[in-house]
Amino acid sequence: MTDTQAKTEDEAILSSETISKALDTVPNAEFMVHNGDLVDDGVKEEQWDWLLGHSQESLLNTTFAPSAGNHEDESYAFIDHFNLDVPENSATETGAYYSYDYSNAHFVVLNSNEDSEKYANFSENQIEWLKEDVKAAKANGSKWVIVNIHKGPYTTSNHATDDDIMDPNGVRNQVAPLMAELDIDFVLQGHDHIYARTKPITSNGTASETEKITETKKGQTVEYTVNPDGAIYLIPATAGPKVYYKNQDPVLGEAFYNLFEVADENHSAIYGPDPSNNTRPVRGQIQNFVGISMDKEKLTAVTYEIDQNKNNAEPYIIDQLGIIKK
Protein backbone atom coordinates (compact mmCIF):
# COMPACT_ATOMS: atom_id res chain seq x y z
CA MET A 1 0.00 0.00 0.00
CA THR A 2 1.03 3.62 -0.20
CA ASP A 3 0.36 7.22 0.81
CA THR A 4 -1.43 6.88 4.14
CA GLN A 5 -0.59 10.56 4.70
CA ALA A 6 -3.29 12.38 6.69
CA LYS A 7 -3.84 16.05 7.45
CA THR A 8 -6.02 15.37 10.51
CA GLU A 9 -6.29 12.69 13.16
CA ASP A 10 -9.63 11.55 11.70
CA GLU A 11 -7.92 10.98 8.36
CA ALA A 12 -5.15 9.05 10.12
CA ILE A 13 -7.81 6.83 11.68
CA LEU A 14 -9.11 6.17 8.16
CA SER A 15 -5.60 5.12 7.08
CA SER A 16 -5.22 2.90 10.13
CA GLU A 17 -8.51 1.22 9.21
CA THR A 18 -7.10 0.46 5.75
CA ILE A 19 -4.08 -1.18 7.37
CA SER A 20 -6.31 -3.26 9.63
CA LYS A 21 -8.63 -4.31 6.80
CA ALA A 22 -5.68 -5.23 4.60
CA LEU A 23 -4.29 -7.57 7.25
CA ASP A 24 -7.75 -9.07 7.81
CA THR A 25 -8.23 -9.56 4.06
CA VAL A 26 -4.82 -11.19 3.57
CA PRO A 27 -4.62 -12.99 6.92
CA ASN A 28 -1.53 -15.07 6.08
CA ALA A 29 0.54 -12.06 5.00
CA GLU A 30 4.10 -12.32 6.30
CA PHE A 31 4.76 -8.58 6.13
CA MET A 32 3.44 -5.26 4.84
CA VAL A 33 5.16 -3.09 2.23
CA HIS A 34 4.52 0.67 2.25
CA ASN A 35 5.50 2.77 -0.78
CA GLY A 36 5.99 6.08 1.03
CA ASP A 37 4.28 9.25 2.29
CA LEU A 38 3.32 7.61 5.54
CA VAL A 39 2.42 10.99 7.04
CA ASP A 40 1.67 14.43 5.63
CA ASP A 41 4.52 16.26 7.36
CA GLY A 42 7.38 14.12 8.59
CA VAL A 43 8.75 16.70 11.01
CA LYS A 44 5.46 16.83 12.94
CA GLU A 45 5.73 14.09 15.53
CA GLU A 46 2.02 14.35 16.23
CA GLN A 47 1.30 12.90 12.79
CA TRP A 48 3.51 9.87 13.44
CA ASP A 49 1.65 9.42 16.72
CA TRP A 50 -1.64 9.46 14.81
CA LEU A 51 -0.62 6.85 12.25
CA LEU A 52 1.45 4.52 14.42
CA GLY A 53 -0.77 4.95 17.46
CA HIS A 54 -4.06 4.14 15.74
CA SER A 55 -2.35 1.31 13.82
CA GLN A 56 -0.57 -0.06 16.87
CA GLU A 57 -2.63 -3.24 17.22
CA SER A 58 -2.11 -4.04 13.53
CA LEU A 59 1.57 -3.20 13.33
CA LEU A 60 2.51 -5.09 16.49
CA ASN A 61 1.33 -8.24 14.72
CA THR A 62 3.24 -7.93 11.46
CA THR A 63 6.52 -6.71 9.97
CA PHE A 64 6.46 -3.33 8.27
CA ALA A 65 8.82 -2.55 5.35
CA PRO A 66 8.49 1.13 4.36
CA SER A 67 10.03 3.44 1.80
CA ALA A 68 10.52 7.16 2.31
CA GLY A 69 8.09 9.52 0.57
CA ASN A 70 8.62 13.18 -0.19
CA HIS A 71 6.46 14.08 2.84
CA GLU A 72 9.10 12.64 5.18
CA ASP A 73 12.16 13.83 3.26
CA GLU A 74 14.00 16.05 5.74
CA SER A 75 15.59 16.16 9.19
CA TYR A 76 15.97 12.36 9.39
CA ALA A 77 12.19 12.12 9.83
CA PHE A 78 12.00 8.74 8.08
CA ILE A 79 14.98 6.87 9.50
CA ASP A 80 14.24 8.08 13.05
CA HIS A 81 11.00 6.08 13.04
CA PHE A 82 12.20 2.75 11.62
CA ASN A 83 14.89 0.22 12.50
CA LEU A 84 16.42 -0.45 9.07
CA ASP A 85 19.63 -2.15 7.99
CA VAL A 86 20.92 0.48 5.56
CA PRO A 87 24.14 0.30 3.50
CA GLU A 88 27.23 1.51 5.34
CA ASN A 89 27.90 5.24 4.89
CA SER A 90 24.67 5.84 2.98
CA ALA A 91 22.93 9.17 3.52
CA THR A 92 19.77 9.04 5.64
CA GLU A 93 18.71 12.67 6.16
CA THR A 94 16.12 12.50 3.36
CA GLY A 95 15.16 8.84 3.79
CA ALA A 96 16.91 5.51 3.31
CA TYR A 97 17.56 2.79 0.78
CA TYR A 98 18.01 -0.84 1.74
CA SER A 99 17.11 -4.37 0.67
CA TYR A 100 15.99 -7.65 2.18
CA ASP A 101 15.21 -11.23 1.22
CA TYR A 102 12.03 -13.15 1.77
CA SER A 103 11.91 -16.79 0.66
CA ASN A 104 13.07 -16.81 -2.98
CA ALA A 105 12.40 -13.08 -3.48
CA HIS A 106 14.67 -10.06 -3.09
CA PHE A 107 13.10 -6.70 -2.25
CA VAL A 108 14.90 -3.44 -3.03
CA VAL A 109 13.65 -0.27 -1.33
CA LEU A 110 14.86 2.95 -2.96
CA ASN A 111 14.96 6.51 -1.65
CA SER A 112 13.63 8.88 -4.31
CA ASN A 113 14.36 11.96 -2.16
CA GLU A 114 18.01 12.21 -3.14
CA ASP A 115 19.28 14.13 -6.17
CA SER A 116 22.30 14.40 -8.44
CA GLU A 117 23.19 15.94 -11.76
CA LYS A 118 22.94 12.56 -13.49
CA TYR A 119 19.82 11.26 -11.74
CA ALA A 120 16.84 13.33 -10.63
CA ASN A 121 15.66 12.02 -7.22
CA PHE A 122 18.67 9.70 -6.81
CA SER A 123 22.32 10.01 -5.88
CA GLU A 124 24.89 8.29 -8.05
CA ASN A 125 25.94 6.30 -4.99
CA GLN A 126 22.44 4.92 -4.59
CA ILE A 127 22.19 3.87 -8.25
CA GLU A 128 25.55 2.12 -8.10
CA TRP A 129 24.43 0.37 -4.91
CA LEU A 130 21.22 -0.71 -6.69
CA LYS A 131 23.17 -2.31 -9.53
CA GLU A 132 25.50 -4.19 -7.21
CA ASP A 133 22.73 -5.22 -4.82
CA VAL A 134 20.56 -6.76 -7.55
CA LYS A 135 23.56 -8.45 -9.16
CA ALA A 136 24.45 -10.03 -5.81
CA ALA A 137 20.86 -11.12 -5.16
CA LYS A 138 20.66 -12.91 -8.49
CA ALA A 139 24.02 -14.55 -7.90
CA ASN A 140 22.64 -15.80 -4.57
CA GLY A 141 19.70 -17.42 -6.34
CA SER A 142 16.83 -14.95 -5.89
CA LYS A 143 14.00 -15.95 -8.24
CA TRP A 144 12.04 -12.71 -7.93
CA VAL A 145 13.32 -9.14 -7.62
CA ILE A 146 10.82 -6.49 -6.57
CA VAL A 147 11.59 -2.77 -6.30
CA ASN A 148 9.76 -0.32 -4.01
CA ILE A 149 10.06 3.29 -5.22
CA HIS A 150 7.97 6.25 -4.07
CA LYS A 151 8.34 8.57 -7.08
CA GLY A 152 7.80 6.02 -9.82
CA PRO A 153 8.34 6.50 -13.56
CA TYR A 154 5.08 5.02 -14.88
CA THR A 155 1.99 6.52 -13.29
CA THR A 156 -1.14 8.14 -14.71
CA SER A 157 -1.96 11.19 -12.60
CA ASN A 158 -0.44 14.58 -11.73
CA HIS A 159 3.13 13.43 -11.22
CA ALA A 160 3.41 11.58 -14.54
CA THR A 161 4.40 14.88 -16.16
CA ASP A 162 6.67 16.23 -13.41
CA ASP A 163 10.11 17.48 -14.45
CA ASP A 164 11.89 14.97 -12.18
CA ILE A 165 10.12 12.20 -14.09
CA MET A 166 10.22 13.53 -17.68
CA ASP A 167 13.44 15.57 -17.93
CA PRO A 168 16.53 14.04 -19.59
CA ASN A 169 17.88 13.17 -16.13
CA GLY A 170 14.40 12.19 -14.92
CA VAL A 171 13.36 8.85 -13.48
CA ARG A 172 11.59 7.68 -16.65
CA ASN A 173 14.65 8.35 -18.79
CA GLN A 174 17.46 7.34 -16.44
CA VAL A 175 16.22 4.92 -13.78
CA ALA A 176 13.38 3.08 -15.53
CA PRO A 177 15.70 1.58 -18.20
CA LEU A 178 17.77 0.09 -15.38
CA MET A 179 14.74 -1.85 -14.15
CA ALA A 180 14.65 -3.80 -17.41
CA GLU A 181 18.43 -4.06 -17.74
CA LEU A 182 18.67 -5.48 -14.20
CA ASP A 183 15.82 -7.91 -14.93
CA ILE A 184 13.56 -6.50 -12.23
CA ASP A 185 10.22 -8.31 -12.20
CA PHE A 186 7.86 -5.93 -10.45
CA VAL A 187 8.10 -2.24 -9.48
CA LEU A 188 5.79 -0.95 -6.73
CA GLN A 189 5.28 2.82 -6.78
CA GLY A 190 3.58 5.59 -4.79
CA HIS A 191 3.23 9.37 -4.95
CA ASP A 192 0.56 9.68 -7.67
CA HIS A 193 -2.63 8.65 -5.78
CA ILE A 194 -4.35 6.70 -8.56
CA TYR A 195 -4.51 3.02 -9.49
CA ALA A 196 -2.68 1.88 -12.64
CA ARG A 197 -0.45 -0.90 -13.91
CA THR A 198 1.68 -1.32 -16.99
CA LYS A 199 2.52 -3.97 -19.49
CA PRO A 200 6.13 -5.23 -19.28
CA ILE A 201 8.32 -2.25 -20.20
CA THR A 202 11.69 -2.79 -21.85
CA SER A 203 14.87 -0.76 -21.44
CA ASN A 204 13.96 1.44 -24.42
CA GLY A 205 10.62 2.41 -22.87
CA THR A 206 8.36 0.27 -25.05
CA ALA A 207 5.89 -2.43 -24.06
CA SER A 208 7.05 -5.92 -25.01
CA GLU A 209 5.00 -8.59 -26.72
CA THR A 210 3.75 -11.11 -24.19
CA GLU A 211 2.38 -14.60 -23.88
CA LYS A 212 -0.49 -14.82 -21.41
CA ILE A 213 -2.19 -17.61 -19.50
CA THR A 214 -5.55 -17.19 -17.77
CA GLU A 215 -6.41 -19.10 -14.60
CA THR A 216 -9.72 -19.11 -12.76
CA LYS A 217 -10.00 -20.13 -9.11
CA LYS A 218 -13.02 -19.70 -6.86
CA GLY A 219 -14.72 -17.60 -9.51
CA GLN A 220 -11.79 -15.16 -9.81
CA THR A 221 -9.82 -14.88 -13.05
CA VAL A 222 -6.14 -13.96 -13.12
CA GLU A 223 -4.21 -13.22 -16.31
CA TYR A 224 -0.56 -14.26 -16.04
CA THR A 225 2.17 -12.83 -18.25
CA VAL A 226 4.66 -15.57 -19.11
CA ASN A 227 8.39 -14.74 -19.03
CA PRO A 228 7.88 -11.01 -19.54
CA ASP A 229 10.59 -9.03 -21.30
CA GLY A 230 10.75 -5.97 -19.04
CA ALA A 231 9.46 -4.80 -15.67
CA ILE A 232 5.79 -4.47 -14.75
CA TYR A 233 4.94 -1.30 -12.80
CA LEU A 234 2.02 -0.96 -10.39
CA ILE A 235 0.76 1.99 -8.39
CA PRO A 236 -1.84 0.94 -5.80
CA ALA A 237 -3.63 4.32 -5.56
CA THR A 238 -3.74 5.35 -1.90
CA ALA A 239 -4.42 3.75 1.45
CA GLY A 240 -5.31 7.16 2.87
CA PRO A 241 -7.55 10.12 2.09
CA LYS A 242 -5.88 12.03 -0.78
CA VAL A 243 -6.66 11.12 -4.41
CA TYR A 244 -5.89 12.60 -7.84
CA TYR A 245 -7.66 12.67 -11.19
CA LYS A 246 -6.15 10.98 -14.25
CA ASN A 247 -3.61 13.13 -16.09
CA GLN A 248 -5.10 14.57 -19.31
CA ASP A 249 -1.97 16.49 -20.39
CA PRO A 250 -1.54 15.92 -24.16
CA VAL A 251 2.23 15.73 -23.68
CA LEU A 252 1.73 12.16 -22.46
CA GLY A 253 -0.16 11.12 -25.56
CA GLU A 254 -1.69 7.86 -26.73
CA ALA A 255 1.66 6.09 -26.94
CA PHE A 256 2.24 6.60 -23.22
CA TYR A 257 -1.14 5.24 -22.19
CA ASN A 258 -0.67 2.26 -24.52
CA LEU A 259 2.07 1.15 -22.13
CA PHE A 260 -0.62 0.39 -19.53
CA GLU A 261 -2.90 -2.59 -19.00
CA VAL A 262 -5.02 -0.52 -16.59
CA ALA A 263 -5.15 3.30 -16.73
CA ASP A 264 -8.64 4.23 -15.55
CA GLU A 265 -9.96 7.48 -14.15
CA ASN A 266 -9.71 7.54 -10.38
CA HIS A 267 -12.61 5.58 -8.90
CA SER A 268 -13.17 8.45 -6.46
CA ALA A 269 -14.09 10.75 -9.36
CA ILE A 270 -17.73 9.64 -9.23
CA TYR A 271 -18.08 11.46 -5.90
CA GLY A 272 -17.17 14.81 -7.40
CA PRO A 273 -14.39 17.33 -6.71
CA ASP A 274 -13.00 18.08 -3.29
CA PRO A 275 -14.66 21.21 -1.84
CA SER A 276 -11.29 22.68 -0.86
CA ASN A 277 -9.50 21.81 -4.13
CA ASN A 278 -11.55 21.18 -7.25
CA THR A 279 -8.51 19.88 -9.14
CA ARG A 280 -8.81 16.66 -7.09
CA PRO A 281 -11.62 14.22 -6.27
CA VAL A 282 -13.18 14.52 -2.83
CA ARG A 283 -10.94 13.14 -0.10
CA GLY A 284 -11.41 10.00 1.92
CA GLN A 285 -13.96 8.08 -0.14
CA ILE A 286 -11.88 5.23 -1.61
CA GLN A 287 -8.74 3.41 -0.44
CA ASN A 288 -6.74 0.58 -2.01
CA PHE A 289 -4.20 -2.08 -1.15
CA VAL A 290 -2.66 -5.08 -2.92
CA GLY A 291 -2.09 -8.64 -1.73
CA ILE A 292 0.99 -10.22 -3.33
CA SER A 293 1.93 -13.89 -3.24
CA MET A 294 4.90 -15.70 -4.75
CA ASP A 295 5.98 -19.27 -5.24
CA LYS A 296 8.67 -20.94 -7.30
CA GLU A 297 7.37 -19.89 -10.73
CA LYS A 298 4.39 -17.62 -10.11
CA LEU A 299 3.74 -14.14 -8.71
CA THR A 300 0.14 -13.04 -8.17
CA ALA A 301 -1.07 -9.56 -7.19
CA VAL A 302 -4.68 -9.00 -6.15
CA THR A 303 -5.85 -5.39 -5.79
CA TYR A 304 -8.58 -4.56 -3.30
CA GLU A 305 -10.67 -1.43 -2.98
CA ILE A 306 -12.56 0.03 -0.03
CA ASP A 307 -15.42 2.37 -0.88
CA GLN A 308 -16.70 4.14 2.21
CA ASN A 309 -20.14 4.46 0.57
CA LYS A 310 -20.88 0.82 -0.27
CA ASN A 311 -20.32 -2.80 0.76
CA ASN A 312 -20.20 -1.66 4.39
CA ALA A 313 -16.75 -0.25 3.60
CA GLU A 314 -15.40 -3.80 3.31
CA PRO A 315 -12.68 -4.59 0.74
CA TYR A 316 -13.56 -6.06 -2.65
CA ILE A 317 -11.37 -7.11 -5.59
CA ILE A 318 -11.00 -4.69 -8.52
CA ASP A 319 -7.98 -6.13 -10.39
CA GLN A 320 -5.68 -9.13 -10.54
CA LEU A 321 -2.44 -9.77 -12.37
CA GLY A 322 0.27 -12.35 -12.40
CA ILE A 323 3.72 -13.22 -13.71
CA ILE A 324 4.97 -16.70 -14.56
CA LYS A 325 8.72 -17.30 -14.92
CA LYS A 326 9.71 -20.61 -16.40
Image: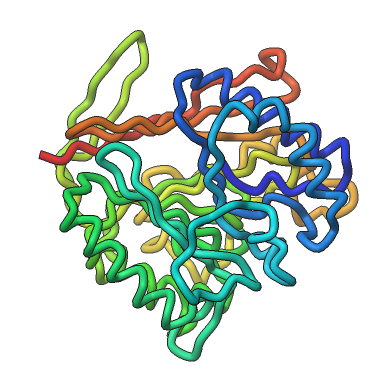
Q: Quadrant of residue 241?
A: top right
Does residue 265 appear in the picture of this structure?
no
Q: Identify the residue at image location x=54%, y=68%.
A: 112
Does residue 299 appear in the picture of this structure?
yes
Give how far across and how far down residue 49 sits, in percent: 82, 44
Quadrant for the N terminus, please: top right
Give how far across and how far down residue 125 sits, in percent: 42, 80
Give how far across and how far down residue 87 sits, in percent: 44, 67
Q: Identify the residue at image location x=65%, y=34%.
A: 287
- Residue 178 lies left or right of residue 37; in this view the side is left
Q: Nearer the viewer, residue 255 or 165?
A: 165
Quadrant for the C terminus, please: top left
- Residue 221 lies left or right of residue 303; in this view the side is left
Q: Is residue 147 above or below residue 23?
A: below
The colour scheme applied to this rendered structure is: rainbow
Give how far across and how far down residue 152 sits, in percent: 49, 61
Q: Nearer the viewer, residue 286 or 94?
A: 94
Q: Identify the residue at image location x=52%, y=46%.
A: 65
Q: Is residue 119 above or below residue 318?
A: below
Q: Is residue 30 above or below residue 263?
A: above
- Residue 8 lies left or right of residue 131; in this view the side is right
Q: Farthest residue toward the top?
A: 218
Q: Is residue 49 above or below residue 220?
A: below
Q: Identify the residue at image location x=29%, y=35%.
A: 299
Q: How many marks?
A: 0
Q: Quadrant of residue 286?
A: top right
Q: Farthest residue toward the left?
A: 326
